[in-house]
């Protein structure tokens, strides 16, 4: 099933849950003007079909002393399937990295790194990222302020 096969009620459910995943089935049903049973069934169908991947709590990085954000472009000396898999496995163990994208252009990967300070970022680069033998270049962009931050997908 693709987005083109979803009706407006399905899209409304996705929009509402994307904004507040803690809505109860009853609250959701009231907002989309359906009874609870069909609302529950639609939500479960959207989950089964993979439109809803999971439900999460959004935490305040500053309050948790992880508000020093760096976008880190990583270039590899060479890249192939095995190297990409090894790098992906390493990423799973690096809790400083909150997002990673395989990119085209100047770098092979773009990492979003959330740490407490410049010193902690330096330690991450030296002790973790720099230890992967295929890394050839790291370019860091330090976030000074966040002007827009959205978790959602435009629908």
Image (spheres, rainbow, N blue to C red):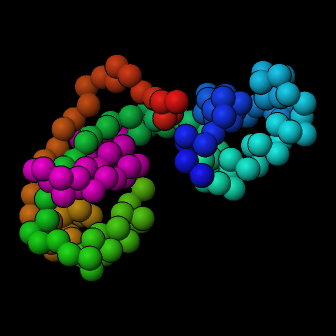
Q: Which residue is drawn at 12% across and 50% down?
A: 105
Q: Residue at x 20, y 75 (%)?
A: 80
**Residue 6 percent across, percent down from the top left:** 63, 39
- Asked whether 134 or 31 is in front, the reply is 31
Q: Residue at x 36, y 63 (%)?
A: 91
**Residue 114 percent across, percent down from the top left:** 36, 43
Q: Can you say whether 32 is above or below 100 in the image?
A: above
Residue reaching furthest to the front: 5
**Residue 110 percent across, percent down from the top left:** 25, 50
Q: Can you say whether 6 is above or below 85 in the image?
A: above
| Whether residue 14 can be seen here | yes
Q: Residue at x 13, y 59 (%)?
A: 75
**Residue 35 percent across, percent down from the top left:** 90, 30
Could you tell whether 16 is left or right of 27 in the image? Answer: left
- Asked whether 6 or 73 is in front, the reply is 6
Could you tell whether 11 is left or right of 63 in the image? Answer: right
Could you tell whether 79 is left or right of 113 in the image? Answer: left
Does residue 98 belong to the magenta stretch? yes
Could you tell whether 1 is left or right of 124 in the image? Answer: right
Does residue 90 belong to the magenta stretch? no
Q: Magenta stretch?
A: 97-123
Q: Quadrant of residue 71?
A: top left
- Asked whether 121 or 77 is in front, the reply is 77
Q: Can you say whether 141 is above or below 20 in the image?
A: below
| Whether residue 122 can be seen here | no
């Amino acid at each position: 099933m693709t987005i083109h096969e979803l009706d407006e009620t399905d899209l409304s459910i996705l929009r509402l849950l994307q904004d507040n995943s803690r809505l109860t089935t009853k609250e959701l049903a009231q907002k989309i003007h359906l009874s609870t049973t069909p609302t529950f069934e639609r939500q479960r169908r959207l989950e089964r079909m993979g439109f809803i991947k999971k439900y999460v709590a959004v935490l305040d990085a500053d309050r948790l002393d992880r508000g020093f954000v760096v976008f880190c472009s990583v270039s590899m000396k060479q890249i192939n399937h095995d190297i990409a898999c090894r790098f992906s496995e390493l990423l799973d163990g690096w809790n400083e990295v909150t997002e990673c994208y395989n990119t085209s252009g100047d770098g092979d990967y773009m990492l979003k790194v959330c740490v407490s300070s410049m010193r902690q970022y330096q330690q991450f680069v030296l002790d973790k990222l720099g230890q992967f033998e295929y890394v050839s270049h790291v370019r860091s962009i330090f976030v000074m302020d966040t002007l827009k931050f959205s978790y959602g997908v435009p629908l």
